[in-house]
Image (cartoon, rainbow, N blue to C red):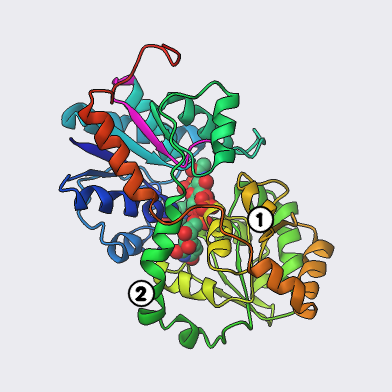
Amino acid sequence: MKPAFVFGTRPEIIKLAPVVRAFEERSVKPLLIHTGQHYDYEMSRVFLEELELDGIDYHLEVGSGTQAEQTGRAMIGIERVLMKEKPDVVLVQGDTNTVLAGALAGVKLKIPVAHVEAGLRSFDRTMPEEINRILTDHASEVLFPPTEEARKNLEREGVTRNVYVVGNTIVDAVLQNSKMAERKSDVLERLGLKPGEYVLVTAHRAENTDSRENLERLVGILEELPMRAVYPMHPRTRNRLKEFGLWERVGSIEKLLVTEPLGYLDFLRLEKNAFAVMTDSGGIQEESIILNVPCLTLRYNTERPETVKAGGNVLVGLEKELVLKYLKRLMEDGEFYRRMASSKNPFGDGMAGERIAGILLELYERGELRVRSSRFI
Ligand code: UD1
Ligand code: UDP
């Protein structure tokens, strides 16, 4: 069997690496296609190196652009490779433009698409990611929702065949890498930080960074944080802060340390030792509950409601009063802190990659890995 992996951004590399590994352990060599949606060393190559995905077969160099430019360029490049290589299945993970491009290119060539992390819904169609999720799920033949809740979202939309709840591969990634992170990363020493004495911040979503008003609200929150904070900054946010004339304001916040985006081992160590996390990232909402660190999500909705229900995550939007209220409570109320930090991880046991490889190989051997004319027959 010949599986083709299509990925292009930081979280896709992190979350697909365990699936690639699971295939390799079964002596199946995957074809690796990197669209180049992310291209800076610290947004891409560092992860390929750390996670040992160094044998990329095709680099498509799609780069940045508008939604259509980026998705279109990726589709054209992916289609060319798929026509030449004729893989048996195309694997995509998550909700980026790369994912949608891979799914559309695959299904239209009648190559079955397997969607890892299927069924997530924020129920906010103004997010580019939500459109990518819905369209990718409906183009896919095999779907791997991480949780029962995600499976129910698919069922509600009539997607029920070849749907397998397998857990989220982020648990595999965290378990496979966090010991190594503790051993190899010197990020705390390098940045002069002590365990439990800082908040880890990340924010890069279009809805938080593309309007000056929202970005300024984020800056307003950072200016009033009651403890030290470290913010490994996504290039999108850095560019927008400069464009909107807010960069100097961020630089003058005494308690805040802004860094370049970090490699996975450094980031995991920083995350594991943080007092709390403040983020609009999907992957970081998941990792924080796995690592037992309270999470405040800088959004008004989430496609990871399991984390909120479990008690490890609170939606605070860009509401300064709410952020400060929760941070102060975490600092002053030990029982509340312990409750949030000990919430149960809803994303499975770290064997998702194994299950995905096993299921796809079994479907292939039974001759059932193919695009069918109808979802219902
Ligand atoms: C994309 C995903 C988002 C995901 C994020 C992961 C879509 C629609 N969005 O957002 O869901 O959470 O990746 O990090 O696919 N840039 C650089 N260097 C890079 C990459 C990007 O400077 O290596 C800058 C460019 O100015 C670019 C901007 O960041 O225009 C945005 O990049 P893009 O890939 O369009 O979206 P992300 O914000 O990274
Ligand atoms: N991450 C990282 N370095 C950073 C920021 C994030 O390694 O400086 C990792 C993080 O551990 C998580 C993933 O990148 O696994 C999340 O990616 P991102 O927030 O860019 O995307 P999202 O999950 O929101 O799509």
The stretch in magenta equals 108-119
Residue positioned 43% across, 36% down in the render: 164
Of the two numbered discs 2 and 1 on the same chain, state the one appearing first in sequence. 2
Residue 82 bears which disc, if any?
Answer: none
Residue 310 bears which disc, if any?
Answer: 1
The location of residue 51, given as percent across then percent down, is: 31, 62
Q: Considering only vertical position in the picture, is 271 above or below 154?
A: below
Q: Is residue 158 found left or right of 70 in the rendered image?
A: right
Viewer-side residue, 329 vs 186: 329
Q: What amino acid type should be assigned to the residue bearing mark 1?
A: Ala
User: From where the camera sits, is residue 224 visible?
Assistant: no
For label 2, the residue is 180
Q: Quadrant of residue 330?
A: bottom right
The location of residue 14, given as percent across then percent down, is: 39, 56
**Residues at marks 2 and 1, CA–CA distance in whole angstroms:** 27 Å
The location of residue 270, given as percent across then percent down, is: 51, 75
Q: Under tag 2, what secondary structure?
A: helix
The quarter of the rendered structure image containing the C terminus is: top left
Q: Is residue 236 found left or right of 45 in the rendered image?
A: right
- 366 inside magenta stretch: no
Q: What amino acid type should be assigned to the residue bearing mark 2?
A: Met
The quarter of the rendered structure image containing the N terminus is: top left
Q: Quadrant of residue 203?
A: bottom right
Residue positioned 45% across, 69% down in the render: 262
User: From where the camera sits, is residue 219 visible?
Assistant: yes
- 118 inside magenta stretch: yes
Crowd class of label 2 (few under 14; some 14 to 19; many from 20; radius 10 Å): some
Q: Quadrant of residue 152?
A: top right
Q: Is residue 83 found left or right of 325 in the rendered image?
A: left
